Image (cartoon, rainbow, N blue to C red):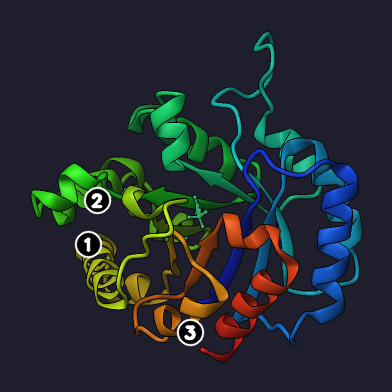
């Protein structure tokens, strides 16, 4: 079943007390969620256990990690394994965020290892893709994103694909205040869905949740989420302000 999701990516922000207040404020104003209308919160690793504890008893709102290691366990100083993420109570992990691709040089082969091990550990993967401005200016964004999806996801079975959510995040729209227009988002999401359909079939493509990310705010969420192929958002900056993110959740629930 295709789910709509409002996902918060806190990135490297908030100390424990701030995170606790943010979640408490969100929970106090949360609209009714359901199997098909879900919320995901991705705090820094150090707060995963806190967030999971706070979400206890609240259905359809889940914790997520922002990353996981390529390896299972062992001598990898500073890494956090997928098993540790599951053990901390998270249900999701974000893989392939453009900041990981760009600043930490994570290529598609690395991302495949991460997604594989995340799925093996029962996590749902939020797989990020999206083009830089130079690619958008050259109007080759469709091919660029298709390659990311082909190299990142085409080795999975249709069954495995059910545990994957795609987040399309044009890099030029992340943290810049410059959102893709609803038409640009819809066009790319429809393209992504057709790429998935070409490989996995129409049913799998129809079931796939495809989130938009890049300067989503309460004020633009309604228009973006009303596009037929936009199934919610992956939200950075605006997810750090409880009333903004509540507005985004409400737009997702009503879409
Ligand atoms: P932004 O970040 O909402 O601050 O643009 C989105 C993301 O990077 O996931």
Residue 131 located left or right of residue 70: left
Which residue is denoted by mark 2 in the rendering? 145
Give me the residue at 59% from left, 37% from top.
67
Residue 252: image x %, image y %? 56, 81
Q: Is residue 55 visible?
A: no
To which quarter of the image does residue 52 belong? bottom right
Q: Is residue 188 above or below residue 147?
A: below
Which residue is denoted by mark 1 in the rendering? 195
Q: Nearer the viewer, residue 123 or 229?
A: 229
Q: Are marks 2 and 1 in contact (CB under 8 Å)?
A: yes
Give me the residue at 33% from left, 71% from top.
205
The numbered mark, 2 or 1, whose residue comes first in the sequence reads 2
For disc 3, the neighbor class at 10 Å (few under 14, some 14 to 19, many from 20) is many
- Marks 1, 3: nearer the viewer: 3
Q: Is residue 225 visible?
A: yes
Which residue is denoted by mark 3 in the rendering? 222
To which quarter of the image does residue 36 belong? bottom right
Give me the residue at 32% from left, 66% from top.
180
Q: Residue furthest top?
A: 75
């Amino acid at each position: 079943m295709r789910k709509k999701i409002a996902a918060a990516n806190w990135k490297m922000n908030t100390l424990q007390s701030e995170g606790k207040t943010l979640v408490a404020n969100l929970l106090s104003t949360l609209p009714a969620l359901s199997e098909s209308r879900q919320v995901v919160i991705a705090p820094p690793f150090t707060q995963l256990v806190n967030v999971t504890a706070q979400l206890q008893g609240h259905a359809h709102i889940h914790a997520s990690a922002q990353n996981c290691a390529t390896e299972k366990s062992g001598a990898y100083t500073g890494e956090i394994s997928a098993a540790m993420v599951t053990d901390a109570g998270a249900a999701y992990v974000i893989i392939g965020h453009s900041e990981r691709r760009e600043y930490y040089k994570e290529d598609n082969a690395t991302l495949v290892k991460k997604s594989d091990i995340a799925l093996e550990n029962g996590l749902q993967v939020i797989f990020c893709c999206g083009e830089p401005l130079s690619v958008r200016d050259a109007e080759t964004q469709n091919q660029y994103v298709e390659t990311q999806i082909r190299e990142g996801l085409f080795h999975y079975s249709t069954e495995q694909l059910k545990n994957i959510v795609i987040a399309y995040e044009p890099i030029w729209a992340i943290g810049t205040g410059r959102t893709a227009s609803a038409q640009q988002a819809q066009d790319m999401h429809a393209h992504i869905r057709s790429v998935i359909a070409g490989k996995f079939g129409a049913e799998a493509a129809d079931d796939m949740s495809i989130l938009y990310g890049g300067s989503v705010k309460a004020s633009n969420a309604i228009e973006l989420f009303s596009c037929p192929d936009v199934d919610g958002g992956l939200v950075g900056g605006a997810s750090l302000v409880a009333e903004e993110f509540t507005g985004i959740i409400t737009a997702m629930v009503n879409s």
